[in-house]
Amino acid sequence: MTNKVQWDAIVIGSGFGGAMSALPLVHAGKRVLMIERGGWVGRGPANWGRYGAGLATPHYTRDASFRVESKGLASHSSAWNCVGGQSVFYGAASYRFRANDFEHNADVVHDSGAEWPFRYSDIEPFYSRCERLLGVAGEVSDASGEPTRSAPFPHPPAPLSPSASRIADAGARLGLTPSRIPLAISYKTGGGRRKCVMCGTCDGFACAAESKNDLATGVIPDLIRLGMTLQTNTICTQLCVKSGRISEVHCVNRVTGERETFQAGVVLLAAGTLATPHLLLTSDLARLNPAGACVGSYLTRHRNVAILGVFAKRPNPTVSFDKQIAFLDFYERAGSIQQLTTASELVRAYLPPTLRRAGMLVTSHSLGLLAMVEDQPQEANTVSISWKSTDRYGLPELCVRHSYSKRDEQLATTLVSQARAVLAEAGALFCIAHPISTFSHALGTVRMGNNPRTSPLDALGRYRGIDNLHVVDGSALPRSAALNPSLTIAANALRIGSHVAGTSALEALGTRHSRSLRNPLPTVSV
């Protein structure tokens, strides 16, 4: 069935890339269709329980599973698919990459050819707009290497929890400089937002109180009010090309199995760092790109390690969200160290029953830190497809291959040692280090760059070889820096969407974009 509407733009995906690239188009009065593979996430008391943890929800969809190969071992993983994408379950950390992160760094880039086609000054205004859209709470600290800003943080941070103060004081005694993690969380009631209840179930959970400013509770509902059409539970299966342009977008409904075809003047692809190259390769579009061999290559995902310090007495006698403090003293040499929340409900949801009680006991007596290293882009780290197996929608199997370089592992060891020292100074009896193997920070598989032979995208996210296709999600970022990438994905998408919409839309955003968090839609039940 062919949809009769001739859309100005089709946005595939509703995460940070999709929502932020759609925003200037909608504000410019364009007819925008947003296609999302998943559905709305319900909000309420159930989000606080073990079945509210991301991997335990139906939004962690098994029909989006993929094969993972690492160091000769194979396993299967899956992905979240819902309105708002990973923003619904993320931990709200909203960092700007540092100015130096946009400059050439031979130690990181090595022989990968990774490069940013613009500098920090080019994306800075969009960082500021995204911070206001997401209501980011934070404070500037010169010691943390905070880059120059055209606007202050929209809101001040919340008071430190007892555990955060303990970690900050311990680091300071060791000569480190604690800084605040900027968080997209509302700490005051107002502007249509509810005040955070400091429940501790933020990272890995959909916010029951709707205080975490994810895209599904703020930005997307406002775009719908302004005229955007959102089609949920819809899977894109193919992008068809005619005369160098995307002529049709083929889709199938996950619930009914009905197939539908859409047409638009421009297509903004934001399916995610793994799903975007999956769709491009399935549609055989790599052959049209001068850097087609790089489509799906140079996957990065940070070398992340969680370090838990175990204490004799419970360090947090009251429940609170304690992801507040970071140490960026080693940023230029190795990476960042950030406080990590230790929600017992995550343990209840993810550990097998035989380990659940012991795991909850350990976490109730623990404080956590996260060591984050910018991993090197490597050509061998790839997303590819195999037509030997297809899913019920006709899509080929997605295969992910990834391993870290020796340099990545050495820097992670350095940061873990520093994190252990902070936890020991805070009074921990011993520490447990656990490498994180998820793809929540995955980037770079359809990267931007200046060289048309090594970068599938130009500086404005245009897919080389196809006139009306832009890629606006994390797959476009050529490097991962050593900080949470969500705000950079959002700012880059807003930058690209503003260009596609035209300068008049960009100017309008200066006064109108703050509306997006004022009047969220009523709670949607599942």
Image (tube, rainbow, N blue to C red):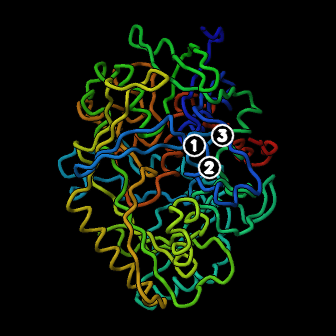
Within 10 Å of disc 2 (Cα), the crowding (few <14, some 14-19, many 20+) is many
Query: In this view of the protein, which residue sits in the foreground, 160 or 341?
Result: 341
Residue 378 as seen in the image, left or right of residue 311 = left
In this rendering, the answer to whether 169 lies above or below 181 is below
Q: Are marks 3 and 2 in contact (CB under 8 Å)?
A: no
Amino acid identity at mark 3: Leu
Q: Position of residue 309 (x, y in %)?
A: 46, 81
Q: Marks 1/2: CA distance?
A: 6 Å
Which disc, if any, is residue 85?
1
Q: Nearer the viewer, mark 1 or mark 3?
A: 1
Which numbered disc, 3 or 2, marks the residue that appears first in the sequence? Answer: 2
Q: Can residue 116 be seen by looking at this rendering? A: no
> SS class of the residue under badge 1?
helix
Which disc, if any, is residue 509?
3
In the rendered image, the residue lying farthest to the front is 354
For image coordinates 61% across by 65% down, the residue present is: 345
Within 10 Å of disc 3 (Cα), the crowding (few <14, some 14-19, many 20+) is some
For image coordinates 39% across by 78% down, the residue present is: 419
Quadrant (top left, top right, bottom left, bottom right) of the N terminus: top right
Q: Can residue 414 be seen by looking at this rendering? A: yes
Q: Nearer the viewer, mark 3 or mark 2?
A: 2
Q: Are marks 1 and 2 in contact (CB under 8 Å)?
A: yes
Quadrant (top left, top right, bottom left, bottom right) of the C terminus: top right
Amino acid identity at mark 1: Gly
For image coordinates 31% across by 24% down, the residue present is: 388
Q: Position of residue 16 (x, y in %)?
A: 55, 43
Amino acid identity at mark 2: Val
Answer with the quarter of the image where residue 353 lies: bottom right
Give the residue at mark 2. 88
In this rendering, the answer to whether 381 lies above or below 465 is below
Q: Are marks 1 and 3 in contact (CB under 8 Å)?
A: no
